[in-house]
Image (cartoon, helix red, strand yellow):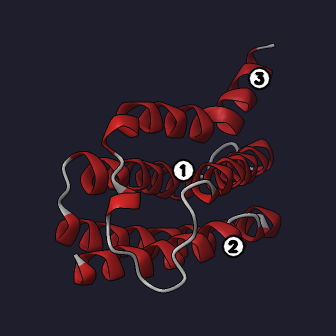
């Protein structure tokens, strides 16, 4: 039973934390009032995309930890990138530190690339499940820079 609770923790932690951050910043999201770069999606897309990405992220980590319970470097990088990911929304929407948000999201890009590399060495499916995440945050990097420049 304890093992299954641990697996559930791995699987659902990103969704739970992402939802908590979303709730925390919900009244401060000013996305629609900002000048947006070309290709900026409608606001409705973000919660759908993040829900899928957080689920894939949790699934990738669950599969990795199920087969490799002791993988300290992968585990550390996973939790660091998750922390950096969650703080980006606070930096961008709550604190409105748009320039710093660019630096922060570039840090996230680097961490996710490194995490995918580490996961690939151990469990390829865990790496592949994070490809949509990488694509999405690279797009978010474009949006962050575009919003900063335009506003």
Q: CA distance from mark 1 to mark 2?
A: 18 Å
Q: CA distance from mark 1 to mark 3?
A: 17 Å
Residue at (19%, 67%) from the top-left corner?
A: 100
Q: Which residue is mark 3?
A: 3
Residue 18: % across, % down: 52, 40
Q: Which residue is mark 2?
A: 131
The secondary element bearing badge 2 is classed as helix
Residue at (29%, 66%) from the top-left corner?
A: 104
In the rendered image, the quadrant that contains the N terminus is top right
Chain-order first, disc 1 or disc 3: 3
- Is residue 74 shown left or right of residue 61? left
Q: Residues within 10 Å of mark 3 (few under 14, many from 20)?
A: few
Residue at (73%, 20%) from the top-left corner?
A: 5
Q: Quadrant of residue 145?
A: bottom left
Res. 12 mark: none
In the rendered image, the quadrant that contains the C terminus is bottom left
Residue 126: % across, % down: 75, 61
Q: Is residue 105 above or below residue 92?
A: below
Residue 6: % across, % down: 69, 26
Q: Which residue is mark 1?
A: 75
Q: Is residue 40 above or below residue 7?
A: below
Are the residues flagged by discs 3 and 2 in contact, CB closer than 8 Å? no
Q: CA distance from mark 3 to mark 2?
A: 27 Å
- Is residue 141 shown left or right of residue 60? left
Labels 3, 2: front one? 2
The secondary element bearing badge 3 is classed as helix
Residue at (44%, 31%) from the top-left corner?
A: 23
Q: Is residue 45 above or below residue 148?
A: above
Labels 1, 2: front one? 2
Residue 52: % across, % down: 72, 52
Chain-order first, disc 1 or disc 2: 1
- Is residue 137 shown left or right of residue 90? right
């Amino acid at each position: 039973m304890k093992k299954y609770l641990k697996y559930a923790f791995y699987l659902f932690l990103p969704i739970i934390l992402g939802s908590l951050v979303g709730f925390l910043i919900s009244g401060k999201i000013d996305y629609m009032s900002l000048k947006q770069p070309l290709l900026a999606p409608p606001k409705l897309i973000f919660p759908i995309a993040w829900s899928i990405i957080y689920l894939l992220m949790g699934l990738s980590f669950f599969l990795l930890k199920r087969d490799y319970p002791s993988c300290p470097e992968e585990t550390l990088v996973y939790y660091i990138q998750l922390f950096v990911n969650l703080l980006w929304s606070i930096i961008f929407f709550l604190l409105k530190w748009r320039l710093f948000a660019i630096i922060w999201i570039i840090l996230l890009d680097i961490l996710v690339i490194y995490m995918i590399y580490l996961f690939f060495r151990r469990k390829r499916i865990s790496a592949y499940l994070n490809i949509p995440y990488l694509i999405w945050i690279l797009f978010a990097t474009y949006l962050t820079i575009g919003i900063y420049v335009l506003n």
